[in-house]
Amino acid sequence: RQEQFRALRSVEPLTKDGKRISLQMNAGLMVDLPQLVESGADGIGLFRTELQFMIASTMPKLEEQENFYRNVVKQAGGRPITFRTLDIGGDKVVSYFRSHEEENPALGWRAIRLSLDRPGLLRTQLRALLRASSGGELRMMVPMVTEVSEIHAVRDLMQKEVQHLSKFGYNLPRKLQFGAMLEVPALMWQLDELMAEVDFVSVGSNDLFQFSMAADRGNARVSDRFDNLGKPFLRILRDIARAGERNKTSVTLCGEMAGKPLSAMALIGIGYRSVSMAATSIGPVKAMLLGLDADLLAAELNAALDDTRSSEPIRDLLVRFAEAH
Ligand code: PEP
Ligand code: MG
C-alpha cells in the first residue's frame, strides 16, 4: 500500500466529480520538511512554532527564531506555509517558561492569552516571522482565539512590528495573510465578525471537539466517549464551512480527524475543500477522494444531518456510503 500511495504523490487531488481539495501537512520541526515533497502535500497548513520552544532549554532568541523560520521557508521551496504563533500552556509544556499551577490548564493561561499578556514575547516572534519572510508571502495564524478583539490586539502588534522594520530599512513580506484558529466554541457565535477581520480560518478540531463535548482530549476515559462524526460535531463543523462560503473566507481544518480517510470524506461532504494532516495521511486521504463523488455524498450527508428524527449514527451512514462507492 505504501507503494500505491507513493505513486499518487504527483496525482492532483480531485474528487471523481472534479472538486479540487487542498491537501496540506502539519509540521513543527526541520525534520518534518523533507516530507513535504515526499508526500506531495500542497503546503504546510499548520506549522506548530511552539515545538522549537519545547525542545530548547532556554527561550530561543530573535535570531534563532528568525534563522529557523528562514530555513523552513527555504526548504519548503515556494509551497505555502501557515505559521501558527506560540501555542504554549495547556498540554504544551515549556519548562523554562514559568507558568503557575493551574487547576484546568486546557482552559487556562495559554496560547494567544499568554502571548497577549507577554507582548514582548509575541512581538519577538512576529518580528522573526516578518524578517524570515522578507520579499515573500507570510501566512500566520493565532491559536485559541475566543473573542474577535484578540485579533485586533494581535494585528496592532503586527502593525507596530511592520512599522519598526520598515523604519530600519528591512525588506518586508510582499504579502501578509492573517488567520485565526477556531478552537473555542464561543467563536461559533462570532463567525461573521471574525471572518470580516481575517484572511482565513483554520479549524483546530482537536481542541474544538474537546471544548464542544466538555471531554478532555488527553483523558482516555472520556476522549473517545463521543463521536467526532456524530451529529452535534458535524453540524458545528458544517456551520463553519457555510460561514466561510457566505463570507468568502477560506477555511481549512487541521486537527487529527483530517487525516482519517472516513473523517476526511465526511469533511468534504459537509463542504470542506482544504485540510491539513500528518504527512503520512496524505496518501490514504488522496486515495479516498479520487474515488469520491462529493455532491452525491453531500446530498445524503446533509439530509441525514438535517433529519431530527432518525437516530441512525452518522458514522454508520458514512461507512455504508464508503462501502457502496
Ligand atoms: C487542534 O487543536 O486541532 C490543533 C490542530 O492544534 P493542536 O493539536 O496543536 O492543539
Ligand atoms: Mg489546538
Image (cartoon, helix red, strand yellow):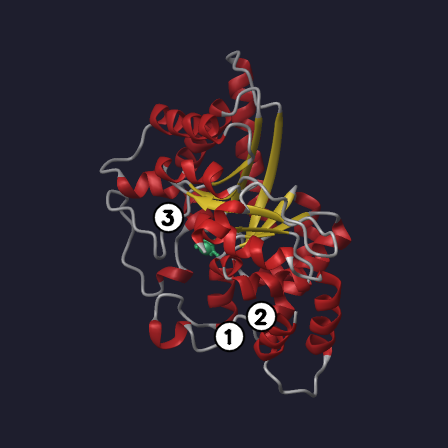
Measured in 3D between alpha carbons, the distance from the residue under mark 2 to the one under mark 1, in whole angstroms, is: 8 Å
Residue 299's place in the image compared with 77, above or below, is below
Residue 15's place in the image compared with 306, above or below, is above
Q: Is residue 250 left or right of residue 131?
A: right
Residue 181's place in the image compared with 102, above or below, is above
Is label 2 or label 3 in front?
2
The amino acid at mark 1 is: Asp
The amino acid at mark 3 is: Ile
- Where is residue 250 drawn, in percent x and y? 67, 47
Q: Residue at x 31, y 32 (%)?
A: 60
Q: Residue at x 58, y 74 (%)?
A: 319
Measured in 3D between alpha carbons, the distance from the residue under mark 2 to the one under mark 3, in whole angstroms, is: 25 Å
Q: In which quadrant is the N terminus drawn?
A: bottom left
- Where is residue 254 drawn, in percent x and y? 52, 53
Q: Residue at x 52, y 20 (%)?
A: 164
* Label 3: how many Cα within 10 Å (few below 14, some 14–19, many 20+): many
Measured in 3D between alpha carbons, the distance from the residue under mark 3 to the one under mark 1, in whole angstroms, is: 27 Å
- Where is residue 311 drawn, in percent x and y? 63, 87
Task: Specify the quadrant of the image occupied by residue 301.
Answer: bottom right
Tell which circle, 2 or 1, labels the residue nearer the N-terminal end. Answer: 1
Q: Is residue 244 left or right of residue 266?
A: right
Q: Which mark is residue 233?
A: 2
Residue named by callout 1: 227
Residue 144 in view of the camera: no
The amino acid at mark 2 is: Phe
Which secondary structure, mark 1?
Answer: loop
